[in-house]
Amino acid sequence: METISFREWQTRFYGSLAQIYEQSEIKALFFRMIDDVFGIPRYKALLDFDTPVTQQQHLEFETILKRLQLAEPLQYITGKTHFRDLELMVSPAVLIPRPETEEMIELSIADINQRSRILDIGTGSGCIAISLAKIYPEAQVLAIDISKDALEIARKNAKLNNVTIQFENCDIFDLPESFCEHKLDVIISNPPYVTESDKSQMHKNVLAYEPSLALFVPDKEALKYYQAICGFARKCLSDKGVIWVEINENFGLETLNLFRSFFKVATIVNDNQGKNRFIRISGKI
């Protein structure tokens, strides 16, 4: 087999994926692959850019590239992702955590302390619950999901990151009364909010591989998860408790008005792109 360098890898990588991803995304993918799969940090790859790779490395590279050309997310290929300062396991059973969710965690920190009782609704990979448990190790963190497969990943991630979280397999539309025995100080959630009609605007790598159960809502029931959160929070949130939710930017006002029907204060908070992305709620009526 002919010798191939990192530079030649990059050229082939860019050319093969140009029809699927933006150039900036391809660049990020390339160096993430180099690091996650081959254990070579970006700076070292750049220093050794003209150094030949091994035959085994090249065979593995070709296998990964073929999967990427089918729009399979790199995170599912490697089985892991990076979220804030955490490394998390992921599989097609859970959504790949997004940067916007990192933003919500940063925003929510001011409402949390070491005595807080926190519930993460729809935990998926556990990224929110685990992040908050890392920041506030003495807080009581609970996390729920309807998917047993997702909870299996979340439990492994909690163990991997050495945090204690109470995980429960239950439906947001039928949450157990036991959660209300001790009032919650914080409810935080990134529920499904992408409408079915929005599918046409989404990339194949999301539609073909990420779990639809964690993504989509019917067009006629776009707010159904927020309605469930409202009903539950009215019973189980403490008087001074706070809710943080991630939302569909196209339904910002509708979601805001829903929460304002049940709580004294609800405020839209934009993400770093200036989009309506989060709502902070407090003050039960």
Image (cartoon, rainbow, N blue to C red):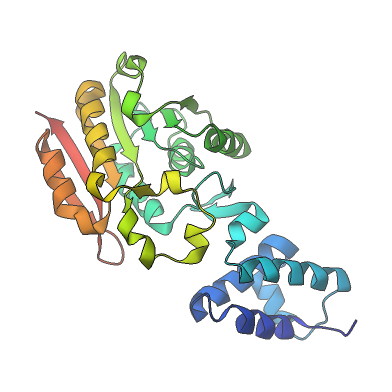
Q: Is residue 94 above or below residue 178?
A: below
Q: Is residue 150 above or below residue 252?
A: above
Q: Depth check: give the residue in front, 217 or 167.
A: 217
Q: Quadrant of residue 9?
A: bottom right
Q: Quadrant of residue 1?
A: bottom right
Q: Give the side of residue 171 with respect to residue 157, left or right.
A: left
Quadrant (top left/top right/bottom left/bottom right) for the C terminus: top left
Q: Is residue 213 above or below residue 38?
A: above
Residue drawn 56% across the image and 36% down it? 149
Q: Give the side of residue 61 with respect to residue 226, left or right.
A: right
Q: Residue 31 in the image: x percent, y percent?
A: 62, 71
Q: Depth check: give the residue in front, 274 or 226.
A: 226
Q: Give the side of residue 194 with respect to residue 138, left or right.
A: left
Q: Residue 121 in the image: x percent, y percent?
A: 37, 35
Residue drawn 74% across the image and 64% down it? 38
Q: What is the residue that sits farthest to the right in this orientation?
A: 1
Q: Depth check: give the residue in front, 156 or 132.
A: 156
Q: Residue 88 in the image: x percent, y percent?
A: 58, 47
Q: Residue 106 in the image: x percent, y percent?
A: 35, 50
Residue drawn 83% across the image and 81% down it? 52
Q: Is residue 195 above or below residue 225?
A: below
